[in-house]
Amino acid sequence: MIKTYIDRQNLLRTNVARQMGTPSTAIYAYEKRDSLKTSTILRICHVLKYNFFMDIANSLPSEYGYDRNLSASKDSIISRQEAEIQKLQHENNLLKELIMGRK
């Protein structure tokens, strides 16, 4: 995942390594490993400003459990915004009818 992201973004591994404070060979080593420590992935996330943990979570089957409270607040925001969109669309349609009725 890290290699793919770095390649897609056309980033120089030496720059990424410098920002992490590691030798440039470390990035190549990270790319070849089957696993990395969570702290290393977190450092890479901060340097690249990309959430690899979300990619990992999204690759898991949907039936796997997770803390629903973490996503509940996002879901409530989305549902409020959907309701607001419907209200605004309704108001927009009313205004169109008023304008068309005056002509």
Image: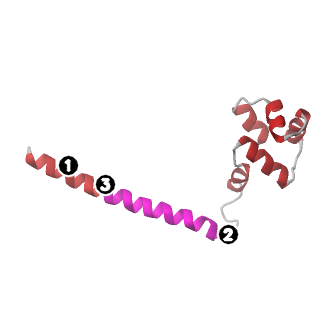
Amino acid at pointer 1: Lys
- Residue 8: percent from left, percent from top: 70, 33
Residue hosting label 3: 89
Earlier residue among tags 3 and 1: 3
| 3 displayed left or right of 84 | right
Label 2: few (<14), some (14–19) or many (≥20) C-alpha neighbours in 10 Å: few
**What's drawn in magenta, residue-wise?**
67-89
User: Which residue does the numbered mark 1 point to in the structure image?
Assistant: 96
User: Looking at numbered disc 3 in the image, what kind of residue is underneath it?
Assistant: Gln
Q: Amino acid at mark 2?
A: Asp
Q: Which numbered disc, 2 or 1, marks the residue that appears first in the sequence?
A: 2
User: Mark 3 falls on what kind of element?
Assistant: helix
How crowded pointer 1 is (Cα within 10 Å; few <14, some 14-19, many 20+) is rated as few
What residue sits right under mark 2 in the picture?
67
What's the distance in space between the residues labelled 3 and 2, CA to CA?
Answer: 34 Å
Residue 46, percent across and down?
A: 74, 46
